Image (tube, rainbow, N blue to C red):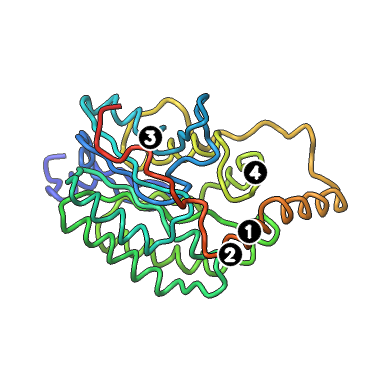
């Protein structure tokens, strides 16, 4: 329209995503280099390749990103079991040294599982990390965490998770980050999207998160992360069967986790990043 202002024309070109992120046309692509940071979620635990190594949402996101950004180089420094301070101290400096166009950061979930976790202190550490990446010239894609309300025991951290997420949303707004809101992905409330440990996404969950990340980054994909799952032929377990499942989960997964905590060890001890350097896919 002839009388429309420059600002109005720009707003018309902007894409407003479902989590209220405003993505300006052409603001992300092409991306020449992408570095993924975090813990088991970004390492890809729960989504194995045939050889037993982990794929995960970040590998799945990098593939379509490379399709629209020829020559994309990709590094993944995420390691299972890492807490936020470890990500900030170990992975952030390494990422800055690579000077990537785009950095993803998803961290803090392992901290929230600890009884004394402080969402305010975690948010301060997270913002420090994001600020360093932005000051170095990288665009940042940050993730707000899943809603744990659907799982017994783990739902006890729901309040802290919500408080942490609220601050992450403000950090994303303040620093002009891309924001992938996992809490709003209601399809992930289905237990079939998770591994038996109730902590790690299964392969289809990682696939859907990758599609969500593509949507936020403006990377074209054919599939839709919102596609409903088919009805579960097994239906909902009866109360007694559900409690048996809870007891099995506690023995198999919760107790070993607590034992590692008491020993001061981590599932990531001795594990190296799967893609420590920027390299072509």
Q: In this figure, which residue is indicated by the disc labeled 3?
A: 61
User: Mark 3 or mark 2, which is nearer the start of the sequence?
Assistant: 3
Q: Is residue 117 visible?
A: yes
- Whether pointer 1 and pointer 4 mark residues with C-beta atoms closer than 8 Å, the reply is no
Quadrant including the C terminus: top left
**Left or right of 239 in this view: 209:** left
Label 1, label 4: how many angstroms apart (C-alpha)?
11 Å
Q: In this figure, which residue is indicated by the disc labeled 4?
A: 190
Q: Secondary structure at mark 1?
A: helix
Residue 19: x and y in percent read 41, 51
- For the residue carrying disc 3, how many other residues have a C-alpha within 10 Å: few (<14), some (14-19), or many (20+)? many
Label 1, label 3: how many angstroms apart (C-alpha)?
27 Å
Residue 107: x and y in percent read 42, 56
- Whether pointer 2 and pointer 1 mark residues with C-beta atoms closer than 8 Å, the reply is yes
Quadrant including the N terminus: top left
User: Mark 4 or mark 1, which is nearer the start of the sequence?
Assistant: 1
What label sits on residue 158 in the rendered view?
A: 2
Label 2, label 1: how many angstroms apart (C-alpha)?
6 Å
Residue 158: x and y in percent read 58, 64
Please determine whether, in this image, residue 160 is positioned above or below residue 152: below
For the point 37% across and 46% down, which residue is it? 17
Picture quadrant of residue 73: top left
Picture quadrant of residue 89: bottom left
- Whether pointer 2 and pointer 3 mark residues with C-beta atoms closer than 8 Å, the reply is no
User: Mark 3 or mark 4, which is nearer the start of the sequence?
Assistant: 3
Label 2, label 3: how many angstroms apart (C-alpha)?
27 Å
Q: In this figure, which residue is indicated by the disc labeled 1?
A: 149
Q: Is residue 12 visible?
A: no
- Whether pointer 4 and pointer 3 mark residues with C-beta atoms closer than 8 Å, the reply is no
For the point 58% across and 43% down, which residue is it? 187
Foreground residue, 223 or 155?
155
């Amino acid at each position: 329209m002839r009388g429309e202002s420059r600002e109005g024309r720009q707003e018309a070109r902007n894409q407003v995503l479902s989590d209220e992120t405003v993505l300006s046309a052409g603001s992300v692509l092409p991306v020449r280099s992408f570095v993924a940071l975090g813990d088991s979620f970004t390492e890809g635990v729960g989504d194995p390749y045939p050889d037993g190594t982990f794929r995960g949402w970040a590998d799945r996101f990098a593939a379509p990103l490379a399709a629209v950004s020829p020559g994309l180089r990709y590094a993944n420094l995420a390691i299972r079991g890492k807490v936020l301070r470890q990500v900030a101290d170990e992975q952030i400096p390494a990422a800055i040294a690579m000077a990537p166009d785009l950095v993803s950061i998803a961290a803090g979930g392992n901290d929230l599982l600890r009884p004394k976790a402080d969402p305010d202190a975690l948010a301060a550490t997270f913002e420090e990390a994001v600020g360093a990446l932005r000051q170095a010239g990288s665009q940042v894609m940050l993730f707000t965490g899943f809603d744990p309300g659907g799982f017994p025991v783990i739902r006890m951290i729901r309040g802290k998770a919500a408080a942490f997420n609220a601050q992450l949303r403000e950090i994303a707004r303040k620093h002009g980050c891309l924001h992938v809101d996992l809490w709003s992905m209601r399809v992930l409330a289905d237990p079939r999207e998770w591994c038996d440990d109730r902590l790690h996404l299964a392969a289809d969950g990682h696939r859907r998160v990758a599609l969500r990340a593509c949507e936020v980054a403006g990377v074209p994909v054919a599939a839709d992360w919102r596609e409903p799952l088919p009805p579960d032929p097994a239906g909902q377990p009866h109360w007694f069967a559900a409690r048996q499942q809870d007891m099995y989960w506690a023995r198999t997964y919760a107790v070993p986790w607590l034992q590692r905590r008491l020993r001061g060890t981590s599932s990531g001890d001795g594990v190296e990043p799967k893609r420590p350097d920027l390299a072509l896919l």
